[in-house]
Amino acid sequence: MTANTSVQALRHGFLSRGQRLLIGGEWVEALSGETIEVLDPATGGVLGTVAQGGAEDVGRAVDAARAAFASGPWADMPAAGRASLLNRLADLIEANADEIAIIESIDGGNPINSIRRLDVGLAIGNLRSIAGWSDKIWGDVPMVPASTPGMAYVVREPIGVVAAITPWNAPFLMAVHKIAPALAMGCTVVLKPAELAPFSAIRLGELALEAGFPAGVLNIVTGFGHVAGQALVDHPGVDKISFTGSTRVGRSILAGSAASMKRVTLELGGKSPIIVMADANIDLAAIGIADEIALKSGQYCAAGTRLFANAAIHDALVEGIVKRLRGKRLGAGLDDGCDVGPLISKAQLDRVTALVDEARGDGATVALGGCAAQRDGFFFEPTVLTDVTPAMRVYHEEVFGPVLSVTRFDADADLATIAALANDTDYGLAAKIWTKDLAATHQLARMIRAGSITINGGIHTAGRLPFGGFKQSGLGREGARDGMLAFTELKSVSLAF
Ligand code: NAP
Ligand code: MG
């Protein structure tokens, strides 16, 4: 089968089939029989449908997850067994990586090469890393004098039934990042993917069944956030919500979880600052900044989108960024040589357009782009706005489009002033620093209130370091050991001899 025929086979097969819910190991229709149309963001046309899960479907899925958690093969399985299932899933994803990348690229619109390398590649690597944690979480035993007639110990237990609610901007990677640590720790899961790009999560469910996860361990309910997502938040049988999405919905999930005191991890939005000092390697900084703005057409939570440039290098840096972005080709995810795909939806395109128009009206200078592309689908031109001030909405609000806001700072500004600019936001997900000055690097890293600080582009450790936000960018961390522990409860046991 050539690459072209496999794309056609997916378009006319998997994507157009009418996908169902995964509940208790079976693919079933929603009880209502209703479906949701899923659009191709590169054309605006209908790709296919998924089942529109409602509150009763969520109830069935939670029951299946509870049953699988409480007894049966999953409850009895040693940690090493869970690790081998997760590794088998990673192997299956690797064996089907091209197909998953095509599905993801068509559904979400992003360039297939970056999906294959970043989303699917990271999912496989991180899944294997997470599998390795399964049997490496230990409890504690406090020291007591030998003469003490008793002892105590602290154990970790799986938290129970986890609702994983994911966004559309990196649907496959987000789904893997949510389900893998929950499963590694022995929890069971109900996954609710975003309605705008649900297909790769469904393919993940198929592969999980093929890998041999017992029935009910992973359930998938597609549907609207305010219906299926809200039903998970309201369901007293859900022990934890692991959510990635907007701060607005995160806030409502946090409030809603209070009723049954659910545990909550929230990975929310960002408006991450980039600081470029006068001594930075301007060429490398320009490339790094431009490439990040182009990645997923700016629909990337940790993207650096608020650039603060030292006045001495401001113009040269902007010129370099503009030059790099000019070389990016817009196109549908599967188009040869395309670098920047469409935005996910018409609503997203309208929002990005409105924010940029407003900034222009308020006095920002458009150094590049500034408008929707003249073609079908939901494309927005890579855009650089300079002279952006705190009076503008684009300075504060997450745009989630390929839009960089640039503000200059005085050539002799001190570090406290620069850090204050970076911290002038309700968000605190990430910050990027470009400088060769070692002392300034570490002082700024300490002063900036954000969960991830990347210096001179950083190194590729995604998923292996704790990830999450300060302030309104979230609650808790995903990734690494902290991400595993977030799916456990602590239990203290003490006994007298
Ligand atoms: P969103 O609108 O908050 O939706 C995220 C998920 O929540 C979707 O599955 C959505 O369902 C569901 N949802 C909506 N209302 C709900 C409710 N009342 N109760 C429960 N679930 C509900 O976010 P998005 O637009 O998909 O994604 C973009 C946002 O995600 C951006 O703010 C971005 O920064 C953030 N994000 C953060 C990270 C991170 O790790 N920090 C990573 C990626 C993205 P439907 O879409 O199906 O309606
Ligand atoms: Mg779609």
Image (cartoon, rainbow, N blue to C red):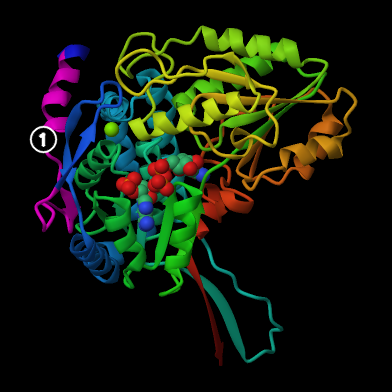
Q: Is residue 424 visible?
A: yes
| Residue 409 locus on image (x, y percent) | 80, 27
Specify the amino acid type for callout 1: Arg
Q: Quadrant of residue 358?
A: top right
Looking at the image, how many numbered discs can be counted on the residues? 1
Q: Which residue is mark 1?
A: 17
- The one of 40 and 183 positioned closer to us in this rendering: 40
| Residue 171 locus on image (x, y percent) | 36, 38
Q: Quadrant of residue 69?
A: bottom left
- Magenta region includes residue 19: yes
Q: Quadrant of residue 73?
A: bottom left
| Residue 10 locus on image (x, y percent) | 16, 25
Q: Is residue 440 above or below residue 182?
A: above
Q: Which residue is pictured at 40% across the width and 13% down the height?
A: 330
Q: Which residues are magenta?
A: 5-34
Q: Is residue 76 visible?
A: no
Q: Which residue is pictured at 30% across the width and 29% down the height?
A: 104
- The one of 89 and 141 positioned closer to us in this rendering: 89
| Residue 343 locus on image (x, y percent) | 39, 27
Residue at disc 1, secondary structure: loop
Q: Is residue 61 left or right of residue 299?
A: left
Quarter in which the C terminus is drawn = bottom right
Q: Is residue 228 above or below residue 403?
A: below
- Magenta region includes residue 17: yes
Classify mark 1 as within 8 Å of ligand 2 or not, answering yes or no: no
Quarter in which the N terminus is drawn = top left
Q: Is residue 115 above or below residue 450?
A: above
- The one of 278 and 497 positioned closer to us in this rendering: 278
Q: Is residue 363 above or below residue 50?
A: above
Q: Is residue 217 left or right of residue 299?
A: left
